[in-house]
Amino acid sequence: MRGKETILIFVFFFLMLEKVEGFDYPYRSFYDRDPLKPLVNKEGRIVITDKRKGFLLQGIIYTDSYQALINNNLYRENDVIQGYRIKRIEKDKVVLEKGGEKFILRWEEK
């Protein structure tokens, strides 16, 4: 009986380990976000970037036109990133589009 319990615990451990390894925690390193910017805003909403599309909005810059810092690269409107065209860059968001699907990256103030 002791052997079956050990095998059962072993199987349970590996099933849980696989579940944990498959979780894409949105904050992985110093480079993923500004360490001085909180993970939760004043209203209690989580402000972590959506990782499902693989985009990380790190900043929005305005000089003569808006530019967005996404995944450590600087982009302008109409640039293409991972097959998505940047349709619009505003002071607090970037609108991307691919095949009619729109995806919005939001920048939230501290």
Image (tube, rainbow, N blue to C red):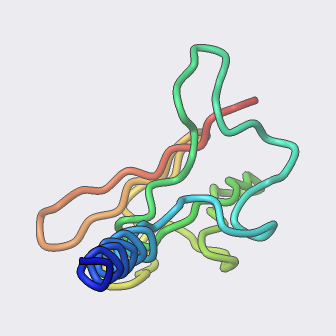
Observer-nearest of 43 and 96:
43
The image position of residue 36, as x and y in percent, is: 87, 44
Q: Is residue 71 left or right of residue 93?
A: right
Residue at (29% x, 74% y) in the render:
5
Residue at x 44%, y 68% (from the top left corner)? 20
Q: Quadrant of residue 19?
A: bottom left
Q: Is residue 44 above or below residue 9?
A: above
Residue 56 quadrant: bottom right
Q: Residue furthest toward the front?
A: 1
Looking at the image, residue 16 lies above or below residue 73: above
Write the residue at 52% across / 61% down. Answer: 25
Q: Position of residue 14 (x, y in %)?
A: 36, 80
Query: Position of 20 compared to 15: left or right?
Result: right
Residue placed furthest toward the top? 43
Compare residues 19 and 32 and report the one nearer the observer. Answer: 19
Which residue ends up furthest to the left in the rendered image?
A: 100
- The relative height of residue 86 versus residue 34 in the rendered view (above or below) is below
Image coordinates for residue 51, horizontal then vertical, percent: 44, 64
**Residue at horizontal 50 percent and vertical 44 percent from the top:** 106
Location of the C terminus by quadrant is top right
**Quarter of the image with the N terminus in it:** bottom left
Q: Is residue 45 left or right of residue 71?
A: left
How many numbered markers are drawn?
Answer: 0
